[in-house]
Image (cartoon, helix red, strand yellow):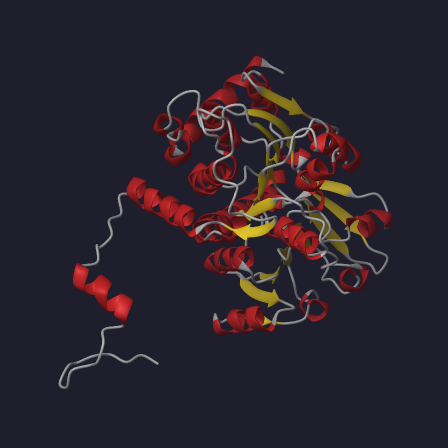
Amino acid sequence: MPASGRVEAIGRIASARRDMPLVAGMPSCHPAPGPLSGRVIAACVHLTPETVVLVETLRGLGARLRLCAANPLSTQDGVASHLRRLPGVEVILGTADWDGYRWAVEEVASQGADLVIDDGADLILAVQASPDHAGRPLLGACESTSTGALRLQAAQDSGSLGVPVFAITRSAAKRLYDDLHGTGQSVLDALLRTTNLLLAGRVAVVAGYGTCGRGIASRLRALGAQVVVTEISPQAALEASLDGLAVRPMAEAIGDADLVVTATGSRDVLTEQHLIRAKNGVILANAGHFDVEIDVDWLRGTGPGTAVRPGLVSYSLPSGQDVLLAAEGRVVNLAAAEGHPPAVMDVTFATVALCLLELGAADPKTSATTGLQHYSAGVHSVPAHIDTTVARLALVHAGVALDVPTNAQQAYLRTWGGPVRAGTNRDHAE
């Protein structure tokens, strides 16, 4: 690749490293050769500068890595080139289509692994099914997406998940930093870059009011959009309504929408039956991990699209409207922008690294795994002590201090205070 691209990538990696003190500082806490010495980690991740910082840290903890791209459109050539130059790191890249992605995943999985980092669960399931799996027993994995966690839960329910997996998205710190604030900001960044749309006064439909959907909706609303939410969950719909947002079925909402963002983690959120009702000129974007929320195949079947801006293609429907699709229906914040800011990924990747140590740290004298015994095969939430550690470290680096409970307060919370003395002014909240 051109030297200018490498120089730019190195600068962005250095910037990410400065903004990721939790992850970058981990190797200094462990003596050489590191608690992951000898471990092979397979990873299907977005190849961004932030990922380089995680890979450097895992190398500093002793691991070797084999990587492929979770989304070819998010792969940055300079980053991939830099990763290939790191000792003990192999990068497998396929073509930018589905077949190329599957080939790369299978290639990474073919040599087995001790630990896996995944975005979407494809690699975890592939490593588990690999013929070499028995030769290198898989100790455990980390899955960073809600979609992947749901797939793995289904595998567990059917009895086909044979390893412990930490669902990183179940971390309270990760949901707050990554899903709510990171997704909210980076999706809006991608939309503004791709469309240059004035959001004030526009009708913006957000499909899905989970943590990611809430982050997207709040930022659209902050820029003056009239936000409508579509949901299948009564509880999520109630939350959206109590937050002051309109809640309508997609078949009704799309007729008024200037912009639709899908963030459900499911599929077939926008299909032909919805799109034929769309307002002329509506912009469609997907913030879910897989490109199955918008029926892109049906759109392409309506005829050749016309590129109107970089990353934005217009399709003329048989019903007469033009609809504009952002980033080919792929996860828009990475396919059309830079993804989450480094400070966000610092919290997520710190959680991933600590979970890998929990699953695969080796005794330096025996090389035996020390942390696996109490985690059965199945999907697990991030352990509370890891979640708390990451949150505390993030607060320290942000310069935020906490109150420390007194001995009397701790005793009170353990015993609920005993009987209430007459005349005390004690609040009984119902």
Q: Residue at x 21, y 58 (%)?
A: 405
Side (left or right) of 341 relative to 409: right
Image coordinates of residue 172 in percent, x first then y, are 45, 54
Side (left or right) of 241 relative to 377: left
Image coordinates of residue 412 in percent, x first then y, are 23, 68
User: Residue 70 lies in what quarter of the image?
Assistant: top right
Compared with 88, 15 (above or below) is: below
Image coordinates of residue 164 in percent, x first then y, are 59, 45
Side (left or right) of 34 relative to 326: left
Q: Nearer the viewer, residue 239 or 365?
A: 365
User: Residue 420 lies in what quarter of the image?
Assistant: bottom left
The reply to whether residue 297 is in sight is yes
Side (left or right) of 12 relative to 304: left
Q: Nearer the viewer, residue 408 or 217?
A: 408
Q: Residue at x 57, y 63 (%)?
A: 209
Question: Which quarter of the rendered picture does the N terminus lie within?
Answer: top right
Compared with 269, 11 (above or below) is: above
Q: Nearer the viewer, residue 349 or 332?
A: 349
